[in-house]
Amino acid sequence: MTVKLSDYVASFVSRLGAKHVFMLSGGGAMHLNDSKTALGSRVDRHENIGRGWIGREGFRALVNHARLRRLGAFIETPHFGGDVPDRRNLDLLKSLRVTGAKARSGR
């Protein structure tokens, strides 16, 4: 099942309200991990960033989303072979993020 990020965020906002989704009253954070199983499988099996069903492009969209990009994040991944505290996953997420003028313009 393919879901556009904008539709997914809109679904959360309609159910929970923007205040709770975007933590408008203060700091907030996202919990990030890729998934070994497809959306709707009702199975919570974590995968390294970019290696599962969300994939690199899904995370690229997430970390550059106009409202979500301002939030901090926690990662919960299986790690890459003894790589603790998971530097490769953190570096990958940082590499997907657009910076500078492109980020400010929302592109």
Image (spheres, grey):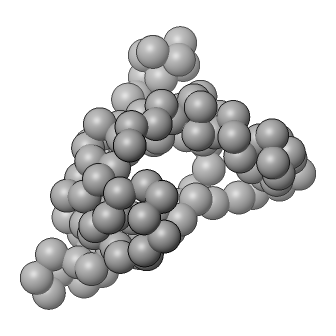
**x%, y% of residue 23?**
79, 52
Q: Quadrant of the N terminus?
A: top left
Q: Kindly indicate the quadrant of the structure image that contains residue 26.
A: bottom right
Residue drawn 27% across the image and 80% down it: 78
- The image quarter containing residue 52 is bottom left
- Point out the image quarter for the C terminus: top left
Q: Give how far across and how far down residue 42 sits, in percent.
A: 48, 70
The answer to whether 32 appears left or right of 8 in the picture is left
Whether residue 71 sits left or right of residue 12 in the image: it is left
Query: Residue 96: x percent and y percent?
Result: 30, 39
Q: Identify which residue, 51 or 79, lies in the foreground.
A: 51
Q: Is residue 65 above or below residue 91?
A: above
Question: How many numbered marks does the figure carry?
Answer: 0
| Drawn side of residue 72 relative to residue 40, left or right | right
Figure check: 8 above or below 101: below
Give the residue displayed 40% in from the left and 28% down from the top. 99
The answer to whether one can see residue 49 in this image is no
| Foreground residue among 39 and 88 | 39
In the rendered image, residue 39, in percent from the top left (x then y), is placed at 43, 55
Q: Is residue 81 shown above or below 77?
A: below
Q: Residue at x 29, y 36 (%)?
A: 57
